[in-house]
Amino acid sequence: QVQLVESGGGLVQPGGSLRLSCASSGSFFSIDPMGWYRQAPGKERELVATITSGRNTNYADSVKGRFTISRDNDKNTVYLRLNSVKPEDTAVYYCYAETRATRDSGVDRFWGQGTQVTVAS
């Protein structure tokens, strides 16, 4: 079993910055990729960004150029830097990770509990 614990959410003014962190723990052979989704009230959960262990990244069009995803492979921790935030970035942000228990096992996806980001003046 894998546990993901997010931190760093909160209230930020439009145009401001915030950094989210997601630390993983548990037993696994590999953890790849890791990333972030978000869910705003009344909307479906949407992909924000992903990163592989080789640091290949993918972003939603709505956050390209403003958000930066990174990871520390030694700590199995993923980060999301939010810059130039907008009110429409308000959402609960969920960390996720895909793991394999062994080299030959299938992929399991785990989720964090979510952290609220509110953009308001």
Image (cartoon, rainbow, N blue to C red):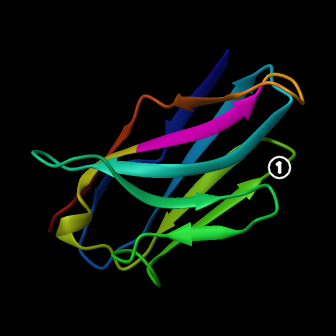
Please identify the residue farthest to the top as the structure is shown.
1
The magenta stretch spans which residues? 94-100
Report the front residue among 49 and 72.
49
Q: Residue at x 67, y 14 (%)?
A: 1
- Say whether residue 95 is magenta: yes
**Three-letter residue code for mark 1:** Asn
Give residue 42's position: percent from left, percent from top.
Answer: 9, 45
Q: Is residue 58 above or below residue 102?
A: below
Q: Which residue extends farthest left?
A: 42
Q: Quadrant of the C terminus?
A: bottom left
- How far from the left and from the top, in percent, is residue 117? 31, 51
Magenta stretch secondary structure, dominant: strand
Residue placed at 71% from the left, 32% from the top? 99
- Closer to the camera in the image, 94 or 101: 101
Q: Quadrant of residue 31?
A: top right
Camera-nearest residue between 104 and 92: 104
Circle 1 residues within 10 Å: few <14, some 14–19, many ≥20: some
- Say whether residue 97 is left or right of residue 106: left
Residue at (38, 40) in percent of width and height: 115
Left or right: 104, with 95 as reference point: right
Q: Secondary structure at mark 1?
A: loop
Task: Please check the rendered image and state whether residue 92 is part of the magenta-colored stretch, yes or no.
Answer: no
| Residue marked by disc 1 | 73
Counting from the top left corner in percent of width and height, residue 113 is at: 42, 28
**Image x and y of residue 43, in percent:** 15, 49
Eyeballing the image, is 17 above or below 48? Answer: below
Indicate left or right for 20 with 37 as reference. right
